[in-house]
Image (cartoon, rainbow, N blue to C red):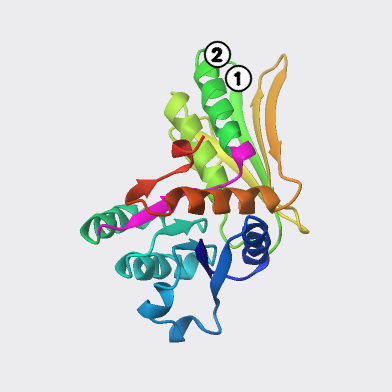
C-alpha cells in the first residue's frame, strides 16, 4: 500500500517506521516546508493518507484529501467543531475518512471501561468525579482530544455533570486538570472520590508506538473503502 503522511514530526516518523515494517511504501511526506506546493495529483499517488499535523491546519488538510478522493486517516484533533461540514463534503465527494481522538488499542479499550464505570457510578451521588491528563510540552491542544472523549462519555452517563472544563470546578462541572510536562506520551486518570474511599482508573502510554500502529492499522482498514469510520469499526 502507498501511504502519504500529512505531518512529519515525531508521530509522522513513528508511523513511517511501522508502515515500512508492515511492507508499505511512504510515497509522500508533507510538512510546513512543502505543503503549499503539493498538488492534487501528488496526493493521488497514495492509496491512503495519514494526517497527524497540527490543529490549525488539519481541517484544510482533510478537505484537500477528500476533494482529491484519497482516503484519509485523521489523528489530529481540534477540528471536531467542523465535523458536520466534513461529513457533508465526504458524502458529496464519495470520500473515505477514518477519524479518532486516539488510535491506541489500549486507549480505546479504556474508553469502554470509562463509559461502563461512569454508568455504574451514576447511582452513587456521594462520589464526585474528576480527571487528570498529562502530556508532553509540545502538545498544542488543551485538553487533549482523548480527554474530551473521556469527558463526554462521563457527562453522557453521570446525570449531575452537565459540562467539562479545565477552569471551572463545581458540582455540575467535570473538572479536567491538564498538565503539560517533559516528553510524556499521554496519561489519563479518572478519579471518583467520596468521604470513605477513592476509585481510580488510569491509562498510561509508554511511548508513541501504540498510537502509530493504530493509525497504520486504520489505513489498512480504510484502503478501498468509502464512508466514515472510527476505531469502534476495528475493535
Residue 3, numbered circle: none
Q: Which residue is mark 1?
A: 127
Tell me: residue 38, above or below residue 155.
below
Is any part of residue 144 visible from this angle?
no
- Is 182 a magenta residue? no
Tell me: residue 226, above or below residue 204.
below
Residue placed farthest to the left in the image? Answer: 92
Query: Which one is nearer the viewer's eye here, 205 or 8?
Result: 8
Tell me: residue 186, above or below residue 89.
above
Query: Which one is nearer the viewer's eye here, 158 or 18?
Result: 18
Q: What secondary structure is found at the residue carrying circle 2? A: loop
Left or right of 220 on screen, residue 130: right
Q: Residue visible at 50% across and 65% down? A: 2
Residue placed farthest to the bottom in the image? Answer: 37
Q: Residue visible at 69% across and 22% down? A: 199
CB atoms of marks 1 and 2 within 8 Å? yes
What is the C-alpha distance between the residues marked 1 and 2?
A: 6 Å
Is any part of residue 5 visible from this angle?
yes
Tell me: residue 178, above or below residue 16.
above
Residue 66 falls in which quadrant of the image? bottom left
Residue 80 locus on image (x, y percent):
40, 53
Residue 19 falls in which quadrant of the image? bottom right
Q: Which residue is mark 2?
A: 124
Q: Residue visible at 78% across and 59% down? A: 182
Query: Which one is nearer the viewer's eye here, 161 or 12?
Result: 12
Q: Residue visible at 76% across and 46% down? A: 206
Q: What secondary structure is found at the residue carrying circle 1? A: loop
Residue 132 locus on image (x, y percent):
66, 41
Residue 210 locus on image (x, y percent):
66, 47
Local crowd at mark 2 within 10 Å, few (<14), some, or many (≥20)? Answer: few
Local crowd at mark 1 within 10 Å, few (<14), some, or many (≥20)? Answer: some
User: Which contiguous range is marked in magenta?
Assistant: 94-107
Amino acid at each position: 500500500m502507498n501511504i502519504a503522511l500529512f505531518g512529519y514530526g515525531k508521530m509522522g516518523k513513528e508511523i513511517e517506521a511501522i508502515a515500512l515494517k508492515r511492507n508499505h511504501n511512504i510515497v509522500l511526506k508533507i510538512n510546513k516546508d512543502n505543503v503549499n506546493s503539493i498538488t492534487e495529483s501528488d496526493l493521488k499517488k497514495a492509496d491512503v493518507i495519514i494526517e497527524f499535523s497540527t490543529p490549525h491546519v488539519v481541517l484544510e488538510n482533510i478537505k484537500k484529501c477528500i476533494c482529491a478522493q484519497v482516503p484519509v486517516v485523521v489523528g489530529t484533533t481540534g477540528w471536531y467543531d467542523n465535523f458536520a461540514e466534513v461529513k457533508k463534503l465526504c458524502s458529496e465527494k464519495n470520500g473515505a475518512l477514518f477519524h479518532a481522538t486516539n488510535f491506541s488499542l489500549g486507549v480505546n479499550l479504556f474508553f469502554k471501561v470509562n463509559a461502563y464505570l461512569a454508568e455504574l457510578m451514576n447511582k452513587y451521588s456521594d462520589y464526585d468525579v474528576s480527571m487528570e491528563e498529562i502530556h508532553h510540552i509540545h502538545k498544542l491542544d488543551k485538553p487533549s482530544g482523548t480527554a474530551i472523549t473521556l469527558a463526554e462519555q462521563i457527562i453522557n452517563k453521570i446525570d449531575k455533570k452537565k459540562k467539562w472544563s479545565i477552569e471551572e470546578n463545581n458540582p455540575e462541572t467535570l473538572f479536567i486538570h491538564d498538565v503539560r510536562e517533559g516528553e510524556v506520551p499521554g496519561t489519563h486518570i479518572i478519579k471518583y472520590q467520596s468521604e470513605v474511599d477513592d476509585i481510580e482508573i488510569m491509562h498510561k502510554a509508554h511511548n508513541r508506538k501504540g498510537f502509530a500502529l493504530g493509525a497504520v492499522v486504520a489505513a489498512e482498514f480504510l484502503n478501498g473503502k468509502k464512508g466514515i469510520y472510527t476505531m469502534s469499526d476495528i475493535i
